[in-house]
Image (cartoon, rainbow, N blue to C red):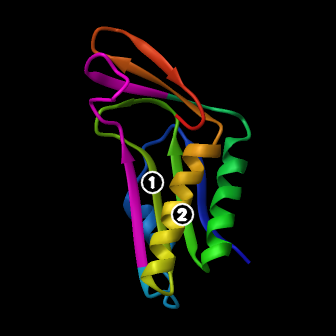
Amino acid sequence: MADVRIARISDAPIALDEHVAAIDDPRMGAETSFVGRVRDHDPDASGVVTALEYTAHPEAETALHRIAERAASAHGAIVAVSHRTGRLAVGEAAVVIAVAAAHRAEAFEACRVVIEDIKRELPVWKRQIEADGTAEWKGIGG
């Protein structure tokens, strides 16, 4: 059975320590995490990126839970994952993933699978805002 402790879509700031605490389990010998932050540049941007605005489909949290369940089941892992919505400034965390597994290979792989599946499948869209006011929408997979 998949062990998903957190699978949340929210406009509230995400705390890595909450996710790490959620996966704490004496059966597990390895923990890994991933934090995806808003950066001040993008290869597709013509200028400096100042913010990202995330919008989620109403069923995005259900989709996120399914993504986490698949990774947890496939790798015998515990998963805690959150994705932000709303306007995020440069430096803010947009995605936080924490994974615990019996061994490091499984922990790293489960974490990698979660973020790659989020990028490919999660119905969340972002609007990238540049310093000059230019804005561009990016969808699933972008």
Residue wearing tag 2: 80
- Please name the residue shown 43% across and 14% down the image: 135
- Please name the residue shown 71% across and 57% down the image: 66
Q: Amino acid at mark 2?
A: Ala
Q: Marks 1 and 2: CB-CB under 8 Å?
A: yes
Q: Position of residue 70 (x, y in %)?
A: 68, 65
Closer to us: 12 or 26: 26
Question: In 3D space, how far apart are the residues under numbered discs 1 and 2 (Cα atoms)?
Answer: 8 Å
Which numbered circle lies on residue 58? none
Residue lying at the far front in this picture: please name it: 43
Q: With 91 as the anchor, is 19 left or right in this view? A: right
The mark nearer the N terminus, 1 or 2, is 2
Residue 79: which quarter of the image? bottom right
For label 2, the crowd category at 10 Å Cα-Cα, with few meaning under 14, some 14 to 19 and many 20 or more, is many
Against 102, is 20 above or below?
Answer: above
Q: Quadrant of the N terminus?
A: bottom right
Q: Position of residue 13 (x, y in %)?
A: 42, 43
Q: Amino acid at mark 1?
A: Val
Residue wearing tag 1: 96
Against 68, is 53 above or below?
Answer: above
For label 1, the crowd category at 10 Å Cα-Cα, with few meaning under 14, some 14 to 19 and many 20 or more, is many
Residue 48 magenta-highlighted: yes
Q: Which residues are magenta?
A: 31-53
